[in-house]
Amino acid sequence: MRRFATERAKRLLVGSFRSSPPLFSAPLCSSASAAAAAMDSAASPVALDTINQKVLKCEYAVRGEIVTHAQRLQQELQSKPGSHPFEEILYCNIGNPQSLGQQPITFFREVLALCDHPPLLDKSETHALFSADAIARAWQILDAIPGGATGAYSHSQGIKGLRDAIADGIAARDGFPANPDDIFLTDGASPAVHMMMQLLIRSEKDGILCPIPQYPLYSASIALHGGSLVPYYLNECTGWGLEISELQKQLEDARSKGITVRSLVVINPGNPTGQVLAEENQKEIVEFCKNERLVLLADEVYQENIYVDDKKFNSFKKIARSMGYGDEDLPLVSFQSVSKGYYGECGKRGGYMEVTGFSAEVREQIYKVASVNLCSNISGQILASLVMNPPKVGDESYESFNAEKTGILSSLARRAKALEDAFNGLEEVTCNKAEGAMYLFPRLHLPKKAIEAAKAVEAAPDAFYARCLLDATGIVVVPGSGFGQVPGTWHVRCTILPHEDKIPDIISRLEAFHEAFMEEFRD
Amino acid sequence: MRRFATERAKRLLVGSFRSSPPLFSAPLCSSASAAAAAMDSAASPVALDTINQKVLKCEYAVRGEIVTHAQRLQQELQSKPGSHPFEEILYCNIGNPQSLGQQPITFFREVLALCDHPPLLDKSETHALFSADAIARAWQILDAIPGGATGAYSHSQGIKGLRDAIADGIAARDGFPANPDDIFLTDGASPAVHMMMQLLIRSEKDGILCPIPQYPLYSASIALHGGSLVPYYLNECTGWGLEISELQKQLEDARSKGITVRSLVVINPGNPTGQVLAEENQKEIVEFCKNERLVLLADEVYQENIYVDDKKFNSFKKIARSMGYGDEDLPLVSFQSVSKGYYGECGKRGGYMEVTGFSAEVREQIYKVASVNLCSNISGQILASLVMNPPKVGDESYESFNAEKTGILSSLARRAKALEDAFNGLEEVTCNKAEGAMYLFPRLHLPKKAIEAAKAVEAAPDAFYARCLLDATGIVVVPGSGFGQVPGTWHVRCTILPHEDKIPDIISRLEAFHEAFMEEFRD
């Protein structure tokens, strides 16, 4: 393995890699048609320099060039089997569990199928195919939808009965009440984040405090809406700690430059960093937002993904309410998604935001923007109500549901630990624990020679590393530069999602590649 | 009936209507929580005057104040039956067929249910519950999805195999080839329209030519993206004719004001106007866009909704290709949706845009923006592939499918005609034929006294009429002012979607109301 990796690495790193296709000039869109490719942009009515420059500025590394290159390799593997030293591409670039073989939760899919085709509910055969509580839940959901019409546009915020169920789920989770009128159902969390950015950002003079590293949806959305990302650095040395002194420093710095900071984004559990915030830390964050009059945008989509016994997910709303703070004390938005957790239903595009602490007249504006898009998809709405109200002890499906759920979560915890240990075992790599979420974000202490080699091909050093890793092993990770990092440090983000059976092979390939890479470039 | 309507109208129009709640100060968002309502906006970190003013400017009448008021009345009917002179609210404000009882196409829902819960495909009972071709189609779709994972994020443009099916459907429709790489699957047509506006609009100096009247998604999206709507008026006297001389005049006028006109929006069949463009007219439009270097944004979501024998839907791409124009001649985007047609699957949020005539580098930018939102929902993607490739002659489901389809379309045609005749029978009302789409847009030649009464309550005259109609009959229509109209003319948009059984009653109520209204306000 080592020999293969070394040779492969040599060929790639020293040979073809420095020739075409150059690392950063390959088209982002592999699928541009031949006709489009042949067109002369300058002659077109829509030349590149005539489009909205905010679009041009926006970047989204999770589906950036490295993924496009991986798709190209995959096509090559299909058309010419054996053309690469690996048999398949292992997509560790994105939190997309079911693409890597994770099975959906049976109960959820039963309910969705019944709601998609309600005539099934009247057929006797259905009882042989579906669990009794899935049938009961489907009836309950159809009763909550006016006319049982799962094919109708709903209320702009989502079906009221489903929002009731979600509010109940939030209340049960937090021990504080939730109001269904505060829930806006959305096609995944991303459109919800865009809606808030659209509301808050007036110009580049408006700033949004974002963690660095961050999930690039935030930087992309801020760029698209023409605002300024005000970075605050998470402290890698303390397990990606979020320090109030850093928030304060960056806030003041931004203000001194004439930026009106409107909001603080917190991702908990962290993406790409995997840390789970301690309750005391969350209290300080709430206090900071209240004092500084910032909207707290809480990305809580990984709330079910906790892998360590000494940490627990607390929603920011629970924290704020436990401090005695209500609507009048701070505007707070919590984002949740059906794409993550143990359910991982990315393709269903379900999610919601819980919007509290805004005046009625500003809420009307949020409602209006939601109305322009009519509503989010109803299957996603149903699924959001299910993940916030899964089967309970005593329900027919409970045992099998719970077995599926704990099976997935305990496997994710084992995979996180195995990959963390593997990264920490690599020469000049350090990796914090993934306490939660779906990612590891190891730091690569790259030798100078590697940095120079990257420079020679006009690549960031971590992008260079990620590209070499992909070409040698088929493993797709995202360069840290796509998430932001302390200047001069280099990372990659790697999901913990490949099937557990494949983890040992991934680790062997990673180790062999890394050894060859270091052999090649050691100073 | 007349007596009731007169009394009701008198009480409403002369009495309570002029007192609270005033017509245009009721909150748009009926669901704002008590906590939010109690908050002082000025004291909040997010006061109304500190939000993005583009959001504030945006309007969307289809779910505007009249609908909020209708929702209030509906709640009153539920809590106090008999509190209004009608038993139910008839939502004619929005093209949402299944909310009014239209049943989904069985074949489509069978396939969706099977794809949602693929283990069904292995069970023998399934053959008793699903048609054989639905089962075969579900297998075919699952085979097209990597790993059969309907819960995974797909390619940012949508699943390749489904785009292949859509491209085949377009080619069969047009007689010209379509490229699956040109298809971007989206959550309904609205996000696709936003994507194009986001791409094209740089500032208020960029203009988009839009029909007046128009579907307010366009005005809302242009406002949200900070551009200028350049209106061109459809000619009501020639059945909402689209005249090139008008386009030319408005284009030149906009240019003389320093506006860079980037694009022409055409809605065919028309919304809210229901006209179907003639082939010769479409050729002129294509020529105009080519000569003036405009992006043709073709809203073709009503392509299946044609109700007259002498008109036929032609896609703009078919027209352009039949003129010998290819990618290099003009940028053209066609929007399609699963929400309209005979399927009316609004809640599924499926749709696509076919993007042709852009350079590879601009296409990469569209791909990037699509990637930031990861992908559209997979059920919507599947449904988009189904509506573009429905059962064919010889398939097991074909006969029942075709019966459902023609049943819906012929009923819609009868309803369109009945309502058109009814509007034309009203005093001082004229109404063009709905050749296609789902709406009538009758013109109200309102008496001066009515206009003055509207002024007294600070309402637009057509909004006043729509409010009176709602309060007297429970029928919800949208004032013409929400779509734009020639200044000094007044209209309402009324869908043709209520269940056919209800049409006679709706017409009686409408006639009685209108008579009472005219009685009250006749000059």
Image (tube, coloured by chain):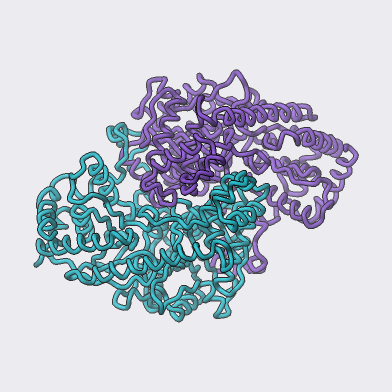
Chain colours: A purple, B cyan
Please tell me which residue lies in front, A12 or B498: B498
Q: Is residue A173 above or below residue B274?
A: above
Q: How many marks?
A: 0
Please tell me which residue lies in front, B485 or B339: B339
Examine the rendering and report whether any part of residue B4 can be seen: yes
Instruction: Tell which residue pokes out farthest to the right in this image.
Output: A3
Examine the rendering and report whether any part of residue B262 can be seen: no
Q: Quadrant of the C terminus of chain A?
A: top right
Residue B80 in the figure: left or right of residue B101: left
Dividing the picture into quarters, in which one does residue A220 lie? top right
Image spot of residue B52 (x, y percent)? 39, 46
Residue B336 in the figure: left or right of residue B156: left
Residue A470 in the figure: left or right of residue B69: right
Image spot of residue A281 (x, y percent)? 52, 21
Q: Is residue B374 above or below residue B254?
A: above
Q: Is residue A108 above or below residue B394?
A: above
Q: Quadrant of the N terminus of chain A?
A: top right
State the residue at coordinates (53%, 72%).
B317
Image spot of residue B111 (x, y percent)? 56, 53
Q: Is residue B272 above or below residue B155?
A: below
Image spot of residue B246 (x, y percent)? 36, 76
